[in-house]
């Protein structure tokens, strides 16, 4: 009688050492694998972060330009209703509540000319500057932000942003 040949498809009984080896293979990631993933993620975050921060300054400048356009529109309605722009002394606050200093508006719109309860701030949280009549726009008004540094002048994001300049970038 010959011994039967073992069936290659049949499972071998679990031996203790095989179970430990299988458990290790299924247990998780090694420290090297985790470190490689962390390094890759850090590199990606560095690339994305640099691009996002560069675009943040551009977004603030464009937001400020948009706010200036909105203020110009509100001032145009004020001028149409009252025949003149608010004086420099009355300022942008005249868009929120009826000025009580001369020259008082003739046909002030009840509720003011802005939907907000406060005058808007530029993208850096500073008040807009206002001059009537304007130096740059003698037949209307100048509205500007002093930029990121909050000081007159400057360059790049620190540069003044006014309603007299053409939009760029």
Image (tube, grey):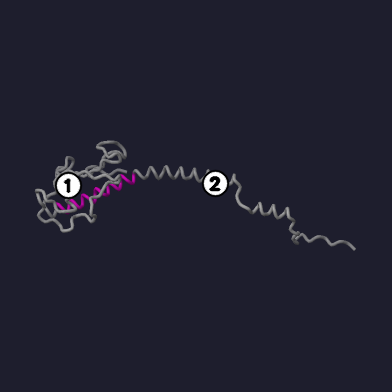
Comparing 32 with 56, the one in front is 32
Quadrant in which the N terminus is drawn: bottom right
Whole-percent x, y for residue 43 in the image = 49, 43
Callout 1 crowding tier (Cα within 10 Å): few <14, some 14–19, many ≥20: some
Residue 158 belongs to magenta span = no
Whole-percent x, y for residue 147 in the image = 28, 41
Q: Residue at x 40, y 45 (%)?
A: 52
Q: Residue at x 15, y 53 (%)?
A: 78
Callout 2 crowding tier (Cα within 10 Å): few <14, some 14–19, many ≥20: few
Residue 91: mark: 1
Judging by the rendered image, the residue that carries numbered circle 2 is 37
Quadrant in which the C terminus is drawn: top left
- The answer to which of marks 2 and 1 sits earlier in the sequence is 2
Quadrant of the image occupied by residue 35: top right
Residue 161: mark: none
Would you say the magenta stretch is mainly helix, strand or loop?
helix
Whole-percent x, y for residue 74 in the image = 20, 52
Q: Are marks 2 and 1 in contact (CB under 8 Å)?
A: no
Residue 76 belongs to magenta span = yes
Q: Image check: 154 left or right of 27? A: left
Return the residue found at the far right: 1
Whole-percent x, y for residue 166 in the image = 25, 43
Which contiguous range is marked in magenta? Answer: 58-79
């Amino acid at each position: 009688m010959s011994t039967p040949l073992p069936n290659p498809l049949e499972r071998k009984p679990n031996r203790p050492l095989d179970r430990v080896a299988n458990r290790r293979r299924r247990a998780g990631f090694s420290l090297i694998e985790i470190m490689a993933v962390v390094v890759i993620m850090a590199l990606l975050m560095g690339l994305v972060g640099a691009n996002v921060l560069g675009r943040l300054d551009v977004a603030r400048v464009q937001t400020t330009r948009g706010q200036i356009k909105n203020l110009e529109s509100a001032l145009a309605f004020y001028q149409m209703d009252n025949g003149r722009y608010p004086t420099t002394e009355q300022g942008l606050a005249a868009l929120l509540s009826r000025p009580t200093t001369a020259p008082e508006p003739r046909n002030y719109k009840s509720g003011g000319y802005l939907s907000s309860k406060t005058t808007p701030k530029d993208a850096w949280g500073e008040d807009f500057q206002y001059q009537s009549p304007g130096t740059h726009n003698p037949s209307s008004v100048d509205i500007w932000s002093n930029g990121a540094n909050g000081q007159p002048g400057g360059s790049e994001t620190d540069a003044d942003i006014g309603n007299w300049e053409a939009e760029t970038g």
